[in-house]
Amino acid sequence: ATHVPAKITCIMGCVGRFQLMVVTVWFAAVITPSTPLTVEDAGLLSTCICPGRPRRSFQGTDASVIVVKAKVRPAFEGGLTAAMRVQQSFSGCLEKNDGITVTSVGRCGLNFESGKEYLMFLRPVDVAQSKYEVGGLNCVGNRLWSSLSESNIKYFKDNRRQCSDAALSTTKPPTTTSPGAGIKLGLRPQCGCHGAPKKTFASAFGQDVVVAKVLKRLFVEGRSNVVVQVKVVFSGCLVVRDIIEVTSVGDCGIDWQSGQRYLMFLRGNERTGFEVGSDICDGSRLWKRASIGLRAFLFASKRDCGQSQPATQSTRSAVQSTTASSPTLTARARTTTTTTTTTTTTTTTTTTT
């Protein structure tokens, strides 16, 4: 330490004030204790030389930048490319449960581990295939989610940005390209099958199967939900003009478009909320993509509320006679009528005799 002033004096006399400032800054960096958060703590590659500042990085970006919390799928076996599931979205238009493939690049890329969750500032590589990259030569805030302080976590949650039209073009795949996936049916692009809606409907007793129109999109705790209005009911206890909130989940969830109508095989109820989609196609799709044969099948196979098996001809006739005499009954009221129709009809016949 005693030699440092001599070196500084020499440089001051030889090359001037500017060079002295540079040396002083270098000297301060050497003697200043390192940041408590290590590269390993942050889950970064060992070649990264700085921990980064996630909050400052986020403040310096706009809504078109993709910032998410995502979890590496358990099947990951190591490497620089991992399949991940979005847990929360803070900027951009990715949604909760979206499946993405992320490649780590540069010396400040992430050291992916199976089942771990990461905060990532993503760059699109191939949006149609849901491929992105993370990292670079300098730290920007990418790190293990578990390494974030409580104040940083609160900051990201409190400053979540809405999906914008500008961000949509760099985050979500176009709905008219990439044939062969689920896009033509209005499903998420990573969905690789078209489903078998007739077979699904045949086994979906007690499930709500409806055609509904998207009224508006919502952004709730990292998820993009929609409010829809029921237009046609093929199964279940919802009625026409009901307005419900629906969450799209899984690889084969619906890629919502405002104003469009969808055939949906719903799970849940009005109390717990409704979900549509999964990792396997179940037949949900854009209604305009439903074939004439499928539409004819669904209208011919309509089921009443609470029906757990195909209705017999006598039950159908009884329901029709009852509802004809009381045309103002709602679908939920008809549920009670259905269970008592046989007894009511028998009693009436006996009295007349």
Image: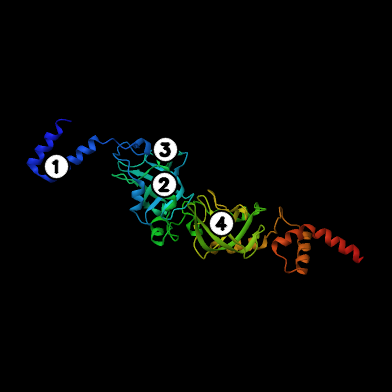
Q: Position of residue 63 (x, y in %)?
A: 38, 57
Q: Give the labeled residue for mark 4.
A: 246
Instruction: Identify residue type, mark 4.
Output: Val
Q: Quadrant of the N terminus?
A: top left
Residue 20 disc label: 1
Note whether 216 is above or below 132 in the view shown.
Answer: below
Q: Secondary structure at mark 3?
A: loop
Q: Residues under labels 4 and 2: Cα distance?
A: 26 Å
Q: Quadrant of residue 41?
A: top left
Question: Which residue is at 76% across, 62% downward?
Answer: 319
Q: Secondary structure at mark 1?
A: helix
Q: Are marks 1 and 3 in contact (CB under 8 Å)?
A: no
Q: Residues within 10 Å of mark 1 (few under 14, many from 20)?
A: some
Disc nearer the start of the sequence (4/1):
1
Q: Position of residue 293 (x, y in %)?
A: 60, 62
Query: Between residues 246 and 124, which one lies in front from this camera angle?
Result: 246
Instruction: Identify residue type, mark 3.
Output: Glu
Disc nearer the start of the sequence (1/3):
1
Depth check, mark 3 against mark 2: the one in front is 3
Depth check, mark 4 against mark 1: the one in front is 1
Instruction: Identify residue type, mark 2.
Output: Thr
Q: Quadrant of residue 45?
A: top left
Q: Give the labeled residue for mark 2.
A: 101
Q: Quadrant of the C terminus?
A: bottom right
Question: Which residue is at 90% across, 66% downward?
Answer: 352
